[in-house]
Every structure is written in C-alpha cells, then in structure tokens.
Amino acid sequence: MIEKGKISASQMSVMMYHAIIATGILFIPKTVFDAAQQDIWISPLWAFPLGLLSVYIAYKLHKLYPDDTIMQYSEHILGVFFGKVIGFILLLLLYTSISVMVWQYGEFVVSEFLPHTPKYVVIGMMILLCAFAVHGGLEVIGRLSEMVFPVFFLLFLVIVVLLLPDIEIKRMLPVMENGIMPSVKGSLALYTWFAQFGIIYFFLPYLTNREKGMKWGGISVLAVTITLVLTNIIVILVFGRVTGNFTAPLMSAARYISIAEFLSHLEAIVMAIWIAGTFIKICVFYYALVLGTAQWFNLSNYRSLVLPTGFLIGVFAIQAFLNSAEASEHFHEVSHGLTDTLVYGLIIPMFLLSIAYIRKMKIFKQKGREKK
Amino acid sequence: MFNRKKFKFNRNKERQIDEEVLKPLYSNLEKNTEVLHFLYEDCSDVIFRSFVIADQIKAQLVYIKGMSNIEEIDSNVLTPLMQQTDQKSINPRLLIEQRVSVAEITKIESFDTCVEQLSVGNPILLLDGDQQGYALGLAKWEKRAIEEPSGELVVRGPREGFTESVEVNTSLLRRKIKSPQLKMKTLKVGSYTQTTIMITYIQDLSDETLIEEITQRIKRIDIDGILESGYIEELIQDNSYSPFPQVLVTERPDTAVSNLLEGRVVIVVDGTPFVLIAPTTFYSLFQSGEDYYHHFVISTATRWLRLIFLFISLLLPSLYVAVITYHQEMVPTKLLLTMVDSREAIPFPALVEALLMEITFEGLREAGLRLPKQVGAAVSIVGALVIGQAAVAAGLVSDPMVMVVALTGIASFTIPRYNIAIPFRLLRFPIMLLAGTFGFIGIMMGLLAIIIHLSTLRSFGVPYLSPLAPMKRRDMKDTLIRAPLWKLNTRPHLTGEYNKYRQSSNQKPFPEKESGEE
C-alpha cells in the first residue's frame, strides 16, 4: 500500500470534525441565514441525514473493497478507462474545492487581520505548513488533529459561555414563522459542507479498527451537527435579524466579548485558534488530493507529489475569485444547486455503489444460471 | 604527503598489533613477555615485574600503575608465592590455587583478553611453561564518591546519584531491584576506548524486540572512542536532525529504576554519570522523579505549573511583540497607556528590542555557566545591570520588555531537564520573528510547525507525543495529571506485547470500620 501509516477510527472522526467545522463555524450562519432567517439553528438538523448518508455510502463501498480507496475501486467497478475518467473528475473537483478553501482562508485573514500583507504570502505560508504535515503522512495529520481538537473545542465553548450575557431569547422568536420550509431551504446550503464527509473514502482503508469506521464517522457527523446548532443558536441570539450583515458572525460576536475590562477584544486569539482548525481542514483535503493523484498515476510513493500539488493549489487559490463580492455571488448561485462537494462527496460514490451492486447482482444471476 | 606517510606507518603498526593480539598465549614465558613488551612499547605506566615462584618457576607479573592495588599485590600475591617450599617439584597451577588469596581470578588464554584485563586494572600473572595466564581481580583506581546529582536536585527523594564508574552505577540499580530478572548485557564500543556499555532491562517487562533493536543500534556504532553517553545518544536516536531529545538522560538511580519498572531500557555508559533511558516520550521529559514522592494533588499542580511555564518560556516574548505591534486593542487601556509611555523614548521596534534582550540574556546565561566560580559573581553583577533599570535608564529598552525577559528566563528554569529546555530556548527566536512579521497568526504558524515536527518523531517505535496523540486513554493517568498511586495499576504501553498490570487494584487505603461506634 502506498500509505504505510495507520490511524484509529476516532482519529479519523476528529480529522473530519475539523475538516467540516473549521470553515463552517465561520461562514455557515450567514450562508444559511439568507434562506432560513431566525430558524438557522434548525437547518443543521435537516442536513444531518445527508452527512450520515455520505458516511454510509463511503462505508458500504469500503466494505466491498476493504483495502482500496475510491481511486482504486472506481477502476474495479467501471473498468480501467472509465475508472480513470471518474478519478480524474474527482481529482479536479478536489482541486477546486481546496482552492476555494484556501482562498477563503487567505481572503479572511487579509481582510480582517493583515490588511497590508500580500495575499500570496498568507496563502503560501499556510500551504507550506500543510505540505510539511502532509509529507509526514496520515499518522501525523491524525495526531495533529487530536492535539488541536481539545484547544479548538474548549475555545468554542468559552466563546459561547462568554457571549451568554449578550443574548436575548426573543431574537430567535417566532420559531418556524413560515413553517418548516425556510429552514429546509437553509439546509440546502449546508449540503456543501456535509457532503464533504464523503471524503472518508480516502481514509477508511487505513484504519486500525475498520469495523468502527461507520460508528466513528456517525459520531463525527453528530458532533458537527451539534456544534453547528450551538453556533447558529448563539449567533442568532446575539445578532438576531442583522446576522446576514456579517461574513463571519461568530468572529464578529467574539469582538463584543468584554468582561471585567480585561477579557476584551479576543478576536485575535479566536483567529489564531481558528487558523489551527483551518490548517487541519486543508491538510485533510490536501492529503486526500495527493494520495488520490498518486494512486491515479499508480505511483509507489506520494511524497514527491506533495510540493508540486501544493504549488498548484496555491496558484488555483490565488486565482479563485477576484474579490469577496464575486465569491459571495458565486456561492449564492451554487449554494442552491449542485455544488462540487456534493458531486465528489455524494453523487460519485452513490453512482459507483449502484453500479457495483448491479454488477454484483448480474454475477449472482449468472451463477444462478450456471447452476441451472 | 608527510601526513599520509605517517598515517600509513601507523596503520602498519596497528595491523601488526591486531595480528599479535589475536594469538593465544605461548607456553614460553620469554616469548609472552616479548609480545607484551611489543604491545606496550613506550608505555611507561605498564609495570613488568619478573620473579621466581618458590625458587623454581619463573613468573612475570604485569600491571598498570595507578590502576591496581599495590599493597594487595604485595601481601596476597608476591609474598606467598615467593615463599620457599619443601616440595621438590611443584605444580604451579595448584600452588596458585593454594597460596594466592585473591577473590576473583580469571584464567586467560589469549593476548586480547590479556590486554582487556590489564586495561581495566587487573594485574596479570604469567608462568613459565604454562599456556594459561591469570588475571587477578585487584583493580583499584581513584573514583568519585556517590554524591547528590547536581543537575537534578530534589526536595524529597534519595540523595544518591550515578558516578563515572559503570560498576558503581550498575550496583546502584541492583541495590534497588533485588529480583534476578534485572538483566544486564555488556557491549564494548570504541576501537580505542573500548568503553563498556551496559544494556539494562527487566526481563518480562521490556519488549524483546525493543532490546534487540537497541542492541543492534549500539552494535552498529563504529567509532574510535565513546567519551560520554551523549555520543551513544546521538548515534542511536531515530531522527538525528531534530533538536528534541529522543532519549531520556538522568543522573538519578531512582528515576532509572522507575523507568525500568515501566518496561523501558536503561543504557549505562562507563565514564559518565548520565545514563540513557529509551524509549521516551515528550511528556516524560517534563516529569521529575519527585512527582511520585509527593501527594498526587501537589504533583499534578506542579506538572501543570511546568506546562504553563513551558509555554511562557517559548511564547512570552513573541506574544509581547505581537500584542505591541499588531494587537494593541487586547491590552486594557490603562496598561496600554503606561506601556506607550515607557516605549516612547525607545528607538527600536518591539521585535528588535525583544531580540536584543533575549540574545543578551542567553549570552549571560552561557557566560555564567562556563566561568570559574570566582568570576561568576562578576557576571551576575553585570547581568543585573544589563537586564535591569540601567538598561531602561539608558533608553535602550522599555520597562515591560525587561519584565518579559526576566519572566522568560525564570520560566525556562522551571523545566526540570536541561536537554528539553534547550530546544525551547532555540525555537523562541524564530517564533519571535514570526510574531514580529505576522502577529498572532505567525505565532500560531510557528506553533503548528513545532507540533507537526513533534508528531513525526518516534523514539524507538513509540510516537513522541503519545499518550496524547495518538490518544491512549489508559496512559493518560500519568501524563498531564499524576493519578494517586493506588490508581496507577497499569504500565504505560510502549511497543509490542507488554506486561500490563503492575499492582493489584483496590489498594485505596481506608480505615477499618469500628463496630463499637455505631
């Protein structure tokens, strides 16, 4: 196998938690608010089954081909040529997906904290750091996410607690003013994030305890849902109807924390720790991309691909959007349609799984015929 | 050209010596003496004493001056052997058994064991007409007494420390572990020094493959000399480019024994009081042996204190620089006003100021370390001037900066082991640069880079950051906290199979219920 390291199912779960939450915690409230208004906290609950479905499909495929990642079993299922085509599409989608993530990171850091620093410096530094981690392999990323998780989660809880003096219950009322539909519509935007759970098809073969893959995947989806519900509740309780005016409402809320004159203006610390989460997120996808590319080319080692891939991601990320206005228009357009993450996280695996089942049935029928 | 010739000449002589050494002893005393004379040519400290046993057999006693006990040679070897005897023909071997009153006598048959015995200080007795020599266990040389180790002081705990002698060190271990399952394997490393290296472990507690791996790594070493255990450490560690120590170094026998009991391997090197313990993890480098001698609440608190000060020693100057340069809004207004006031007259940016002071401080510390004691006092006087009010008055640095540097200095002294404090002292500087260029984001990037590096490290197969990453829930009880002794029922898991239970459970002490009171 190309990756010799092994991670535990719980490590994978923590990795995926970071991979979804890191950007989600900042950008989801605003994205969902456009459709769901004060019901944004209900939306994650509707998206929860979709996340589970992504995990379930990836797990089912893993059950059929326990030692392979999607790049390998797509060839088993569709044949070498069509398998490679699907793999190529998948890699391209991953490229765009990561580039958007890195762009978001760069744009956010530059606009909020380092206005005079060129964006390529910020992006380049992050990619270099990620390349260092990806070069270390899957085990390193697993351990890193385990180290970062307690800090990240503790900080999240601290922010929530410190924001409690500023909340007002009436801001989230009336609940379900226009029935169930606004929150369901809001959850459409969340599919972009929840479909990313599908990426575990790159990690399942490298688990030490494979049978627990589904369980811990599910726990990860649940943890993400709970975190998002909590985030959205606190954001709506603090900002109410003006939530839509902020790009990153939780970060803006952190600015309002002021306790005893001393604990004030915490956003720089929040930012620093958020960066740690984003770092894990980018690492997870970057690693998946590098591993996938190496398997697509049938290489024996993926490490030589780390830096070239990083360079490509950097170039893509800088070129992704001209400015945040263009980006938000893009997100607005795609968030109600078929997004790239939905394609690689859910649709392609679903397609592969159905083909695999059909072929299996055929084989059974043939065997049945032979017996007759 | 000249050098090369000289080198060649030496090589020739060396080869000849190699050939001679491998030969067995001759039965002719003259010939044996000749070979030994050839081997120890120009060695004025090697004494050859020829004498006659009971007026009949010629004999040769060889020893190295200052390494053997001369009084005992006189009274227990020479005097009894040179006495007259009534017997006409004597059996020399029997005579030695009868008369030489020395506890340890080793028979030698070849010149290389001869050289080996001589170099540890054992005198050698050669007889005419006998193909066998005798090494007498009369080695005695000056060695330091057992003292309290100056590098690892404790308030409560044994006051003894290892010394430079490997025999003393292993005896210290054996005195604590009486079980015969304490095993010691001896290896000799160094083509010239032939340094004794003892691989010490407890059978059934240490993983067989681990012992095998360590033995293999030490055997692979081909070097002219081993002067300190640092040589071994550098030649056997997994990642030799990492500034982080991957082997635990200690001077304390109790620390070594507690690690032996956890299934680790202790490597004792002759000539140094520092023994190596492998494998080790990042967290064990912050633990002191004393943690187990105090109440567990106190020990847990101390561990957290060390952890906090570890971060202070790594990050405080960087945080200060970042806050002053980029995130002024985080400082409470009143404090900010004072800080601005004191910084007003300073010509440097905060980063330059911090670098200047930190480098000065490191210089002072290094100066204080190496100077003779008489001059040391001068350094502390000058140091107080450099990092103190005088520097502020001169307009070079601001008051808060002096505070920051002093606090960083104290923080780096709280780390109980010197070798783990060094990488953090070093890494402080690049993080300061990052803080000066990117603020908090730069600090986070630096920290992440360090954590990535630590995650890639392994010490003899054990992940360096375990048991936190990868998480081993059972081993967490002795990492960030020190659970009560009656809870520490299992050994930490290192690699492979292990002997899990170290004590029986339910040992929490409780008073006997008295029936009368109810």
Image (spheres, coloured by chain):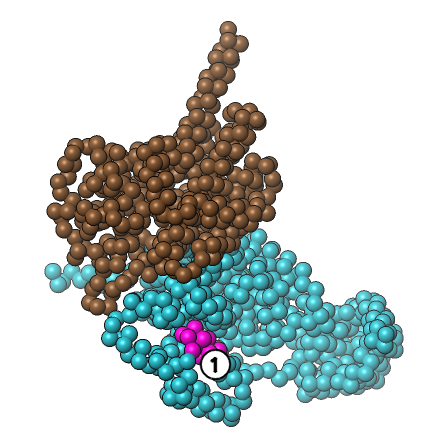
Q: Magenta segment range?
A: B348-361
Chain in cyan in the render? B
Q: Is residue B328 magenta?
A: no
Residue A247, given in percent of the width and then of the height, sits at: 30, 49
- Mark 1 packing: few (<14 Cα in 10 Å), some, or many (20+)? some
Q: How many marks?
A: 1
Mark 1 lies on a secondary structure that is helix
Front position in the image: B342 or B509: B342
Residue B509, given in percent of the width and then of the height, sits at: 28, 62
Front position in the image: B39 or A309: A309
Front position in the image: B34 or A189: A189
Query: What chain is tagged by disc 1?
Result: B
Give the amino acid at mark 1. Answer: Thr
Image position of B361 with respect to A209: above or below: below
Front position in the image: B466 or B406: B406
Residue at 21% across, 68% down: A261
Determine whether, in the image, residue B464 is placed left or right of residue A156. Answer: right
Q: Is residue B359 magenta?
A: yes
Residue B333, given in percent of the width and then of the height, sits at: 25, 72
Which residue is denoted by mark 1 in the rendering? B360
Magenta span main SS: helix
Residue B168, given in percent of the width and then of the height, sits at: 56, 75
Residue at 43% across, 34% down: A344
Q: Does residue A323 show up? A: yes
Q: Quadrant of residue B411?
A: bottom left
Image position of B144 with respect to A19: above or below: below
Residue at 46% across, 32% down: A62
Q: Does residue A215 show up? A: no
Task: Locate the C terminus of chain B by quadrant.
Answer: bottom left
Task: Locate the N terminus of chain B by quadrant.
Answer: bottom right
Q: Colour of chain A?
A: brown
Residue at 23% across, 36% down: A183
